[in-house]
C-alpha cells in the first residue's frame, strides 16, 4: 500500500514546478537553499544535506511539523524549514532563536539590542505587547536612580549601550538619532526603487540633490537628538497641555528659519524634547484619536534598564505616512516639475523652480509630523491624509530658505 501511495505522490508531483526553499538544522549551524517540487523530495534532500536519517521538516516560523503534501503545496517558496531527526524533541522556532540570542548576549555589549528588538516587534507584535503589558503590571519600579546621569552612577542602565556614551541623555539622544537616520535610509530606498528614479537621468540627479540637502539639514538639526533628551529645555507643546503638533503656526516657523544665524537654529520650533525634565514620555495617542492617548500610557526610560528596553516599543508614528504618502508625493512633484517645467506657482503666478524641500524634510524627520506613541496606540491602517509638499517658485519663502541654506552649505564645502 505504501509503495502505491509513494508512486501516486510522485506521479502527481512530477508535473509540479521545482521551487527553492531554505532549510536549516535545529542549532541553526548551517542553512541551505534546496530546490524541490514536493514535500517528499525536500525532506529527502534535506536529510542528505544534514545527514539526518528519518528526517522531518518543521516551519521555522512557528515550529509546526509539515506532513501533508497538499499543505506543502500552499507554502511560499523561500520559506525556512528546520530539519530535525527522530531523537530531537524541541524544535527551535525563529522566535526562540532570537530570544536565546538576546539572553546569551545581553550585557556582553556585543549585540545591537535595538535592532533585534525592532525585528522581534515587527514580526511578533501581539506576542510582544502582551508580554510587555504583563511586565508593566508586575514589575516594581525602583526610581531611586532616576536622576543619575553618569555611567559611573548607574552602570546597570548602560549595559549594552555604546561605550562612548557617558550620560543617559547622550545615550537617549543617540537612540533618537538612530530612528531619524533610519527614516532617511528608508526614504532613500523608496526613492531609488521608484520607476522615475530608474528611468529618468534628470530625475535621478534631482533626487540626489534633494537627498544631499536632507542630509545637510539633518546634520544641522543634529538628527533631532533632543527629542529623547530630558535635559533639553525646549519642550514639545504637548507637554504644556497642547497635543496637536501640526497646529503650530508654520508661518512663524518660516519666519524663524529665515532669520537663522546658525544652522542649528533653523528648526528651533521642531528641535524640542518629547519628555519632561525627569525623563517621562507620554503617549500621544492613536492617529485616529485627535485628543491624544485616552489610556494614559507613559514611560520613563531613564529610571532603569528594563524601561529603556521597553522604550523600544514606543514608536515614532508618521502621521502622514513615509512610504505610502510622503515619498510618493515627492516623486510625483519631481516628475511634474520635469515634465511640465513651465507651470506656475499657484500663490505667486511665477514659474516653479523646485519642490518644497523644507516641507518634505519636516514631514519625514521632525515632530511636525511624528507622534511618539506606545505600540498599542500605533495605528497601522491606511490613512486618508496627504502630504503638504508642493512645487515652489522663487517668490515662495520655502524656496529661498533652501537656496540660502544650500548657498551656505556649499560655501563651507569649498
Ligand atoms: Zn497610548
Ligand atoms: Zn506609523
Ligand atoms: Zn510661489
Image (cartoon, rainbow, N blue to C red):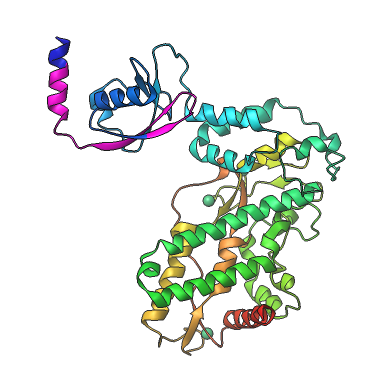
Quadrant in the picture for residue 147: top right
Q: Is residue 281 toward the left or the right of residue 12 in the image?
A: right
Is 263 within the magenta?
no
Question: 349 above or below 107?
Answer: below
| Residue 261, x across and y down, in percent | 76, 78
Which stretch did the figure color magenta? 6-32
Q: Closest to the observer: 115 or 250?
A: 115
| Residue 346, x across and y down, in percent | 47, 83
Quadrant in the picture for residue 366: bottom right
View extreme (bottom): residue: 350
Residue occupying the point 68% across, 75% down:
252
Residue occupying the point 17% across, 34% down:
16
Tell me the quarter of the image containing the C terminus. bottom right
| Residue 53, x across and y down, in percent | 34, 15
Residue occupying the point 23% across, 36% down:
18
Is 15 within the magenta?
yes
Q: Is residue 10 toward the left or the right of residue 177 in the image?
A: left
Question: 312 above or below 414?
Answer: above
Question: 237 above or below 4?
Answer: below
Q: Closest to the observer: 83 or 106?
A: 83
Q: Closest to the observer: 35 or 265?
A: 35
View extreme (top): residue: 1
Quadrant in the picture for residue 163: top right
Question: 337 above or below 136?
Answer: below
Tell me the quarter of the image containing the N terminus. top left
| Residue 93, x across and y down, in percent | 47, 26
Residue occupying the point 68% across, 64% down:
270
Q: Is residue 412 visible?
A: yes
Q: Is residue 294 visible?
A: no
Q: Is residue 248 toward the left or the right of residue 196 in the image?
A: right
Amino acid at each position: 500500500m505504501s509503495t502505491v501511495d509513494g508512486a501516486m505522490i510522485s506521479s502527481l508531483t512530477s508535473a509540479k514546478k521545482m521551487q527553492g526553499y531554505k532549510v536549516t538544522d535545529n542549532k541553526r549551524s548551517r542553512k541551505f537553499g534546496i530546490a524541490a517540487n514536493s514535500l517528499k523530495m525536500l525532506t529527502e534532500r534535506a536529510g542528505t544535506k544534514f545527514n539526518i536519517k528519518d528526517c522531518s521538516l518543521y516551519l521555522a516560523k512557528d515550529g509546526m511539523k509539515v506532513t501533508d503534501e497538499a499543505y506543502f503545496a500552499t507554502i511560499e517558496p523561500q520559506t525556512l524549514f528546520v530539519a530535525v531527526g527522530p531523537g530531537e524533541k524541541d524544535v527551535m522556532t525563529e522566535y526562540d532563536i532570537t530570544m536565546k540570542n538576546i539572553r546569551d548576549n545581553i550585557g556582553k555589549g556585543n549585540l545591537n539590542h535595538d535592532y533585534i528588538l525592532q525585528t522581534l516587534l515587527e514580526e511578533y507584535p501581539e506576542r510582544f505587547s502582551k508580554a510587555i503589558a504583563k511586565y508593566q503590571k508586575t514589575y516594581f519600579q525602583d526610581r531611586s536612580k532616576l536622576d543619575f546621569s553618569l555611567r559611573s552612577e548607574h552602570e546597570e542602565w548602560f549595559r549594552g549601550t555604546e561605550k562612548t556614551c557617558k550620560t543617559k541623555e547622550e545615550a537617549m539622544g543617540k537612540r533618537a538619532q538612530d530612528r531619524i537616520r533610519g527614516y532617511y535610509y528608508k526614504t532613500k530606498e523608496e526613492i531609488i526603487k521608484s520607476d522615475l528614479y530608474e528611468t529618468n537621468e534628470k530625475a535621478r540627479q534631482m533626487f540626489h540633490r534633494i537627498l544631499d540637502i536632507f542630509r545637510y539639514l539633518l546634520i544641522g538639526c543634529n538628527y533631532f537628538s533632543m527629542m529623547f533628551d530630558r535635559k533639553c529645555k525646549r519642550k514639545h507643546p504637548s507637554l504644556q497641555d497642547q497635543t496637536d503638533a501640526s497646529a503650530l503656526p508654520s508661518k512663524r516657523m518660516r519666519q524663524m528659519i529665515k532669520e537663522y544665524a546658525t544652522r542649528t537654529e533653523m528648526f528651533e520650533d521642531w528641535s524640542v524634547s518629547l519628555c519632561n525634565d525627569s525623563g517621562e514620555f507620554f503617549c500621544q495617542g492613536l492617529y485616529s484619536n485627535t485628543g491624544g492617548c485616552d489610556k494614559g500610557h507613559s514611560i520613563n526610560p531613564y529610571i532603569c534598564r528594563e524601561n529603556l528596553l521597553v522604550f523600544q516599543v514606543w514608536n515614532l508614528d508618521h502621521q502622514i505616512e513615509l512610504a505610502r504618502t510622503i515619498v510618493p508625493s515627492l516623486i510625483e512633484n519631481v516628475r511634474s516639475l520635469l515634465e511640465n517645467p513651465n507651470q506656475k506657482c499657484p500663490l505667486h503666478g511665477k514659474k516653479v523652480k523646485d519642490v518644497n524641500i523644507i516641507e518634505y524634510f519636516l514631514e519625514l524627520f521632525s515632530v511636525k509630523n511624528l507622534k511618539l506613541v506606545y505600540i498599542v496606540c500605533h495605528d497601522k491602517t491606511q490613512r486618508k491624509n496627504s502630504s503638504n509638499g508642493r512645487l515652489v517658485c522663487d517668490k515662495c519663502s520655502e524656496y529661498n530658505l533652501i537656496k540660502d541654506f544650500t548657498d551656505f552649505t556649499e560655501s563651507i564645502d569649498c
